[in-house]
Amino acid sequence: MIQGAKSHESCKRCGKCCLANIASLVYDIEDSDRLRWIAENRNDILRILENESAVWMGDHLVSAKTGKIIHSCPFLQCDGIFTTCTIYETRPIVCRNFTPGSSEICPLYKK
């Protein structure tokens, strides 16, 4: 994972930022991300995002196609201790721009 700019500590790989930013992933995908994934032939990523078609239902996201509640980023894997981004090398801009320690949800955040 990336190094924290504010805390100068390594990311703890807890996944809290990924859980908090799920709305950003669903709604804020940049055109440049989509174009990059098309150029990289990452139809797997595009298909997942298209199939989620997330909508807000009260206080949570739901797949418009299946009706299932979307709890986390579909590209986030957890082994019980650490989380891993399965598309880290080509993750979207919203994820690339997150700095560990920059949000109160991050365990590296310092007031």
Image (spheres, rainbow, N blue to C red):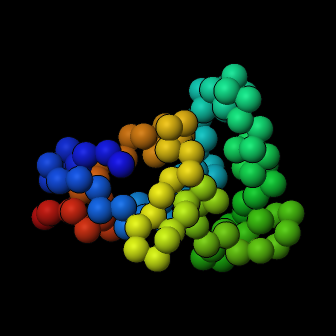
- Against 92, residue 37 (above or below) is above
Image point (56%, 45%), residue name: 87
Foreground of the two, 57 or 36: 36
Q: Looking at the picture, how far across and down is residue 69, in whole percent?
A: 71, 75
Image point (54%, 36%), residue name: 90
Foreground of the two, 55 or 83: 83
The residue most toward the front is: 79
Q: Looking at the picture, how far across and down is residue 10, in whole percent?
A: 23, 53
Instruction: Please tell me in which quadrant of the rendered image residue 46 appears.
Output: top right
For residue 26, side relative to residue 9 (left or right): right
Residue 102 shows up from this direction: no
For residue 49, side relative to residue 66 (left or right): left
Instruction: Please tell me in which quadrant of the rendered image residue 12 appears.
Output: bottom left
The residue most toward the top is: 39
For residue 25, side relative to residue 61 (left or right): left
Image quadrant in which the C terminus is located: bottom left
- Against 91, residue 26 (above or below) is below
- Against 45, residue 76 (above or below) is below
Residue 32 shows up from this direction: yes
Q: How many marks?
A: 0
Q: Looking at the picture, how far across and down is residue 39, in whole percent?
A: 69, 22
For residue 65, side relative to residue 17 (left or right): right
- Against 103, residue 30 (above or below) is above
Image point (36%, 49%), residue name: 1
Q: Looking at the picture, how far across and down is residue 18, in whole percent?
A: 47, 60
Image point (14%, 49%), residue name: 8
